[in-house]
Image (cartoon, rainbow, N blue to C red):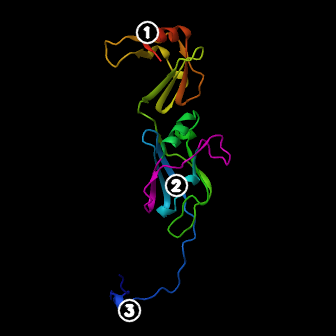
Amino acid sequence: LISDQNGVDINPVPVSTAIGVRTFTPDSTAPVLNGFTFNLTSGLLVMTFSETMLGTSLNMSRFYFVNDATSTPSQSVPIAGGQYAAADGEVQELVLSTNAMNDIKRITDMATSVANSFIRFDTDAIQDMAANPILVGSVQADAVYEDTVRPELIAFSISMAEDSEHLLLTFDETVNSTSFDYSFVSFQQANNSNAVSHRLTNASTTDPDGTILSISLSKSDADELKLSLIHI
Protein backbone atom coordinates (compact mmCIF):
# COMPACT_ATOMS: atom_id res chain seq x y z
CA LEU A 1 0.00 0.00 0.00
CA ILE A 2 2.63 2.55 1.07
CA SER A 3 6.04 2.84 2.72
CA ASP A 4 7.77 5.39 4.96
CA GLN A 5 10.66 7.63 3.90
CA ASN A 6 13.16 4.86 4.68
CA GLY A 7 11.41 2.45 2.36
CA VAL A 8 9.83 0.36 5.12
CA ASP A 9 6.45 -1.04 4.05
CA ILE A 10 3.38 -0.37 6.13
CA ASN A 11 2.17 -3.15 8.41
CA PRO A 12 -0.74 -5.06 6.88
CA VAL A 13 -4.19 -4.75 8.45
CA PRO A 14 -5.94 -8.15 8.34
CA VAL A 15 -9.68 -8.55 7.98
CA SER A 16 -9.99 -9.64 11.61
CA THR A 17 -8.62 -6.30 12.88
CA ALA A 18 -9.92 -3.99 10.15
CA ILE A 19 -9.91 -0.33 11.13
CA GLY A 20 -13.27 1.41 11.37
CA VAL A 21 -13.81 4.73 9.65
CA ARG A 22 -13.16 7.78 11.80
CA THR A 23 -15.50 10.13 9.96
CA PHE A 24 -17.84 9.58 7.04
CA THR A 25 -19.17 12.33 4.78
CA PRO A 26 -22.04 11.09 2.64
CA ASP A 27 -22.54 12.12 -0.97
CA SER A 28 -24.86 15.12 -0.96
CA THR A 29 -24.25 16.43 -4.47
CA ALA A 30 -27.13 16.26 -6.91
CA PRO A 31 -26.34 14.24 -10.03
CA VAL A 32 -26.24 15.92 -13.42
CA LEU A 33 -27.48 14.76 -16.81
CA ASN A 34 -24.43 15.39 -19.00
CA GLY A 35 -26.07 14.60 -22.33
CA PHE A 36 -28.17 12.19 -24.35
CA THR A 37 -28.67 10.70 -27.80
CA PHE A 38 -31.98 9.82 -29.43
CA ASN A 39 -32.74 7.43 -32.29
CA LEU A 40 -35.97 8.11 -34.18
CA THR A 41 -35.87 4.71 -35.87
CA SER A 42 -35.54 2.48 -32.79
CA GLY A 43 -36.90 4.89 -30.17
CA LEU A 44 -33.73 4.39 -28.10
CA LEU A 45 -32.93 7.21 -25.69
CA VAL A 46 -29.46 6.99 -24.11
CA MET A 47 -28.79 9.35 -21.18
CA THR A 48 -25.34 9.84 -19.66
CA PHE A 49 -25.07 11.14 -16.08
CA SER A 50 -22.23 12.58 -14.02
CA GLU A 51 -22.19 9.59 -11.65
CA THR A 52 -23.67 6.15 -11.07
CA MET A 53 -27.46 6.32 -10.87
CA LEU A 54 -29.87 4.08 -9.00
CA GLY A 55 -31.63 2.36 -11.86
CA THR A 56 -34.80 1.49 -9.97
CA SER A 57 -35.33 5.16 -9.04
CA LEU A 58 -35.87 6.28 -12.63
CA ASN A 59 -39.41 7.55 -13.19
CA MET A 60 -40.06 7.72 -16.92
CA SER A 61 -43.15 9.89 -16.47
CA ARG A 62 -40.93 12.65 -15.01
CA PHE A 63 -38.93 13.01 -18.21
CA TYR A 64 -40.22 15.00 -21.18
CA PHE A 65 -39.04 15.48 -24.72
CA VAL A 66 -39.20 19.22 -25.46
CA ASN A 67 -38.14 21.54 -28.27
CA ASP A 68 -36.23 24.18 -26.28
CA ALA A 69 -34.41 24.69 -22.98
CA THR A 70 -36.87 27.15 -21.42
CA SER A 71 -39.07 26.34 -18.43
CA THR A 72 -42.13 26.69 -20.68
CA PRO A 73 -41.29 25.00 -24.00
CA SER A 74 -43.83 25.31 -26.79
CA GLN A 75 -43.77 21.54 -27.42
CA SER A 76 -43.58 18.77 -24.81
CA VAL A 77 -44.14 15.00 -24.92
CA PRO A 78 -43.99 12.87 -21.72
CA ILE A 79 -41.65 9.88 -21.96
CA ALA A 80 -43.97 7.36 -20.35
CA GLY A 81 -44.89 3.73 -20.95
CA GLY A 82 -41.69 2.62 -22.64
CA GLN A 83 -39.15 -0.09 -21.81
CA TYR A 84 -36.38 0.30 -19.26
CA ALA A 85 -33.87 -2.16 -17.79
CA ALA A 86 -33.53 -0.35 -14.40
CA ALA A 87 -29.81 -1.16 -14.12
CA ASP A 88 -27.47 0.95 -11.98
CA GLY A 89 -24.89 2.95 -13.91
CA GLU A 90 -23.84 6.27 -15.37
CA VAL A 91 -25.61 5.42 -18.62
CA GLN A 92 -29.37 4.84 -18.60
CA GLU A 93 -31.13 3.51 -21.71
CA LEU A 94 -34.84 3.74 -22.46
CA VAL A 95 -36.92 2.64 -25.44
CA LEU A 96 -39.84 4.98 -25.89
CA SER A 97 -43.36 3.65 -26.34
CA THR A 98 -45.00 3.62 -29.76
CA ASN A 99 -47.46 6.29 -28.60
CA ALA A 100 -44.66 8.58 -27.42
CA MET A 101 -42.75 8.07 -30.67
CA ASN A 102 -45.81 8.91 -32.75
CA ASP A 103 -46.48 12.02 -30.64
CA ILE A 104 -42.88 13.18 -31.13
CA LYS A 105 -42.93 12.53 -34.88
CA ARG A 106 -46.21 14.43 -35.19
CA ILE A 107 -44.49 17.64 -34.02
CA THR A 108 -42.61 19.19 -36.92
CA ASP A 109 -40.45 21.57 -34.83
CA MET A 110 -39.13 18.99 -32.37
CA ALA A 111 -36.61 16.14 -32.65
CA THR A 112 -35.74 16.96 -36.24
CA SER A 113 -32.19 18.01 -35.29
CA VAL A 114 -29.96 18.63 -32.27
CA ALA A 115 -31.10 22.26 -32.30
CA ASN A 116 -34.70 21.41 -31.29
CA SER A 117 -34.12 18.26 -29.23
CA PHE A 118 -34.05 18.60 -25.44
CA ILE A 119 -34.87 16.43 -22.44
CA ARG A 120 -36.59 18.17 -19.54
CA PHE A 121 -36.85 16.45 -16.15
CA ASP A 122 -38.46 17.00 -12.77
CA THR A 123 -36.60 16.84 -9.45
CA ASP A 124 -37.86 13.34 -8.67
CA ALA A 125 -37.05 11.92 -12.13
CA ILE A 126 -34.05 9.85 -10.95
CA GLN A 127 -31.65 9.54 -7.98
CA ASP A 128 -28.00 8.65 -7.54
CA MET A 129 -26.84 5.77 -5.33
CA ALA A 130 -26.99 8.03 -2.27
CA ALA A 131 -30.63 8.92 -3.00
CA ASN A 132 -29.75 12.44 -4.14
CA PRO A 133 -32.36 13.45 -6.72
CA ILE A 134 -31.50 15.17 -9.95
CA LEU A 135 -32.47 18.84 -9.95
CA VAL A 136 -35.15 20.08 -12.33
CA GLY A 137 -33.72 21.23 -15.64
CA SER A 138 -33.23 20.48 -19.31
CA VAL A 139 -30.37 19.28 -21.50
CA GLN A 140 -29.82 19.51 -25.25
CA ALA A 141 -29.19 16.37 -27.29
CA ASP A 142 -25.68 15.38 -28.29
CA ALA A 143 -26.99 13.57 -31.35
CA VAL A 144 -30.33 12.82 -33.01
CA TYR A 145 -30.49 9.93 -35.47
CA GLU A 146 -33.22 10.32 -38.08
CA ASP A 147 -35.98 7.86 -38.86
CA THR A 148 -34.86 5.68 -41.79
CA VAL A 149 -37.70 3.12 -41.84
CA ARG A 150 -40.55 3.52 -44.31
CA PRO A 151 -44.06 3.66 -42.80
CA GLU A 152 -46.42 0.77 -43.51
CA LEU A 153 -50.14 0.67 -44.22
CA ILE A 154 -51.45 -1.89 -41.74
CA ALA A 155 -55.22 -1.62 -42.24
CA PHE A 156 -57.96 0.25 -44.03
CA SER A 157 -61.72 0.60 -43.94
CA ILE A 158 -64.13 2.14 -46.40
CA SER A 159 -67.55 3.73 -46.13
CA MET A 160 -69.77 3.92 -49.18
CA ALA A 161 -72.54 5.88 -47.50
CA GLU A 162 -74.06 8.19 -50.12
CA ASP A 163 -72.47 11.67 -50.26
CA SER A 164 -69.92 10.84 -47.55
CA GLU A 165 -67.86 8.09 -49.19
CA HIS A 166 -64.47 7.92 -47.55
CA LEU A 167 -61.50 5.74 -46.83
CA LEU A 168 -59.71 5.31 -43.48
CA LEU A 169 -56.02 4.42 -43.76
CA THR A 170 -54.18 3.17 -40.66
CA PHE A 171 -50.37 3.30 -40.59
CA ASP A 172 -47.80 1.86 -38.20
CA GLU A 173 -46.37 5.32 -37.43
CA THR A 174 -47.18 8.99 -37.84
CA VAL A 175 -47.28 10.06 -41.48
CA ASN A 176 -47.19 13.45 -43.19
CA SER A 177 -50.78 14.00 -44.32
CA THR A 178 -49.80 16.62 -46.91
CA SER A 179 -47.66 14.04 -48.70
CA PHE A 180 -50.70 11.85 -49.51
CA ASP A 181 -50.97 11.18 -53.25
CA TYR A 182 -54.26 9.54 -54.24
CA SER A 183 -52.89 8.51 -57.65
CA PHE A 184 -50.95 5.69 -55.99
CA VAL A 185 -54.09 4.12 -54.49
CA SER A 186 -55.86 1.30 -56.32
CA PHE A 187 -58.72 -0.98 -55.33
CA GLN A 188 -59.11 -4.49 -56.67
CA GLN A 189 -61.49 -7.42 -56.21
CA ALA A 190 -58.81 -9.93 -55.19
CA ASN A 191 -55.14 -10.07 -54.30
CA ASN A 192 -53.89 -11.23 -57.68
CA SER A 193 -52.64 -9.46 -60.80
CA ASN A 194 -55.65 -10.49 -62.90
CA ALA A 195 -58.26 -9.00 -60.58
CA VAL A 196 -60.50 -6.14 -61.71
CA SER A 197 -59.10 -2.92 -60.27
CA HIS A 198 -59.71 0.81 -60.12
CA ARG A 199 -57.11 3.52 -59.47
CA LEU A 200 -58.37 6.64 -57.72
CA THR A 201 -58.66 9.70 -59.93
CA ASN A 202 -59.34 12.23 -57.20
CA ALA A 203 -59.31 12.17 -53.40
CA SER A 204 -58.25 14.43 -50.55
CA THR A 205 -57.69 14.65 -46.82
CA THR A 206 -57.82 17.55 -44.38
CA ASP A 207 -56.56 15.49 -41.45
CA PRO A 208 -53.46 16.56 -39.53
CA ASP A 209 -50.37 14.35 -39.40
CA GLY A 210 -51.08 11.10 -37.55
CA THR A 211 -51.38 7.34 -37.77
CA ILE A 212 -54.93 7.38 -39.20
CA LEU A 213 -56.00 9.43 -42.21
CA SER A 214 -59.54 9.91 -43.47
CA ILE A 215 -59.59 10.21 -47.26
CA SER A 216 -62.63 11.72 -48.97
CA LEU A 217 -63.46 9.97 -52.24
CA SER A 218 -64.65 11.82 -55.32
CA LYS A 219 -68.14 11.05 -56.64
CA SER A 220 -66.72 9.55 -59.85
CA ASP A 221 -64.42 7.21 -57.91
CA ALA A 222 -67.18 6.26 -55.49
CA ASP A 223 -69.58 5.51 -58.36
CA GLU A 224 -66.97 3.39 -60.12
CA LEU A 225 -66.23 1.42 -56.97
CA LYS A 226 -69.93 0.81 -56.35
CA LEU A 227 -70.48 -0.26 -59.93
CA SER A 228 -67.48 -2.52 -60.51
CA LEU A 229 -65.80 -3.60 -57.31
CA ILE A 230 -67.63 -3.15 -54.05
CA HIS A 231 -70.93 -4.75 -53.19
CA ILE A 232 -71.86 -3.95 -49.58
Q: Which mark is residue 228?
A: 1
Along the viewing direction, whichever of 67 and 124 lies nearer the viewer: 124
Marks 3/1: CA–CA distance: 94 Å
The answer to whether residue 97 is magenta is no
Quadrant of the image for the N terminus?
Answer: bottom left
Q: Quadrant of residue 197?
A: top left
Q: Amino acid at mark 1?
A: Ser
Mark 2, secondary structure of its residue: strand
Asked if disc 3 and disc 1 are in contact, CB closer than 8 Å, the reply is no
Q: Position of residue 72 (x, y in %)?
A: 68, 46
Mark 1, secondary structure of its residue: helix
Q: Earlier in the sequence, mark 2 or mark 3?
A: 3
Q: Earlier in the sequence, mark 2 or mark 1?
A: 2
Q: Earlier in the sequence, mark 3 or mark 1?
A: 3
Q: Which residue is mark 3?
A: 17
The answer to whether residue 76 is magenta is yes
Of badges 3 and 1, nearer the viewer stands 1
Along the viewing direction, whichever of 180 and 116 lies nearer the viewer: 180
Q: Quadrant of residue 77?
A: top right
Q: Residues within 10 Å of mark 2 (few under 14, many from 20)?
A: some
Marks 2/3: CA–CA distance: 42 Å
Residue furthest front as drawn: 232
Q: Quadrant of residue 214?
A: top right
Q: Amino acid at mark 3?
A: Thr
Along the viewing direction, whichever of 185 and 45 lies nearer the viewer: 185
Q: Residues within 10 Å of mark 1 (few under 14, many from 20)?
A: few
Where are the magenta residues, as a range? 66-95
Q: Which mark is residue 34?
A: 2
Answer whether residue 53 is visible to the viewer in this image. Answer: no
Q: Residues within 10 Å of mark 3 (few under 14, many from 20)?
A: few
